[in-house]
Amino acid sequence: MQADTERLIRESWARFQPVAVPSARFFYEKLFELDPEAARLFSHTDMDAQGRKVMRMFAEIVRTLDQPEALVAEVADLGRRHVHYGVHDAQYDSVGTALLWTLEQGLGEAFTPDIRDAWTEAYLYISTIARRATMRVSKEYQAIRGSRENPTMP
C-alpha cells in the first residue's frame, strides 16, 4: 500500500474516530440490509458490545497499516476465526460496502473520492488476506471432515 493511501486512511479515521462507536449501529444496519443472512450470525450477540469490538478492530487495522507483518498476521487470524462463526466469502463484499457507506455517513463532505479510493484499496487488501486465510481453514476443515466420513481402509 502506498504511503499516500495510508495517510488518507489515517487522517480520515482520525476524523471518523469520534463517531466510530455510535456509527457501528449504522454499519450493522447497512450490513444486514445488504446481507440478511449476516444478521442470523449475530442473532444472540450483544450488538452494542459487538459495535465497540468491530470499531476497535478497524482502529487496530488502521494502526498497523505500515506494519505489514503484524497486519497480515492479525487479519489472517481474523479470517480464520470468522470461518468458525459461519462467515461466507461473499459476505466480505457486503462488509466492505457497509464500511464505505458508514465512513461516508460519518465523514460527510470530508469523504472525498480520494478517501473513498484509499479505503477501497485498503479494504481490498485486507479482505484478500482474510479470504485467503478463510479458504485455507475451510479446506483443512473439509479435509478433516472428509477423512472422518470416508476413512481409508488399510
Image (cartoon, rainbow, N blue to C red):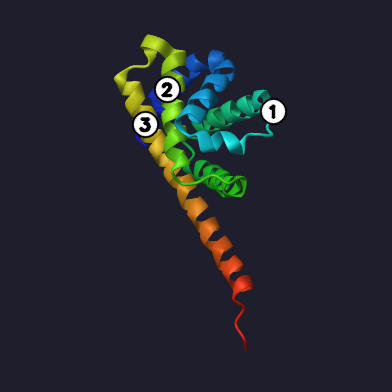
In this rendering, the answer to whether 56 lies above or below 130 is above
Compare marks 3 and 2 and give the one earlier in the sequence.
Answer: 2
Q: Quadrant of the C terminus?
A: bottom right
Considering depth in this image, is 20 or 93 the residue closer to the camera? 93
Q: Quadrant of the N terminus?
A: top left
Identify the residue position indicated by label 2 in the image.
Answer: 101
Q: Residues within 10 Å of mark 1 (few under 14, many from 20)?
A: few
* In the foreground, 43 or 50: 43
Q: Circle 2 — which element?
A: helix
- Numbered mark located on residue 120 in the image: 3
The image quadrant that residue 150 belongs to is: bottom right
In the structure shown, which secondary structural element does the residue marked by tag 1 occupy? loop
Left-right relation of 81 to 46: left
Residue 42 at what x, y percent from top left? Answer: 62, 34
Identify the mark nearer the N-term, 1 or 2.
Answer: 1
Crowding at label 3, few (<14), some or many (≥20) Cα neighbours within 10 Å? some
Q: Amino acid at mark 1?
A: Asp
Which percent across, then down, holds residue 41? 60, 38
Amino acid found under the numbered disc labelled 3: Thr
* Residue type of the residue flagged with mark 2: Trp
Q: Position of residue 115 (x, y in %)?
A: 35, 22
The residue depicted at 51 percent of the width and 57 percent of the height is 136
Asked if residue 97 shows in the view, the reply is yes
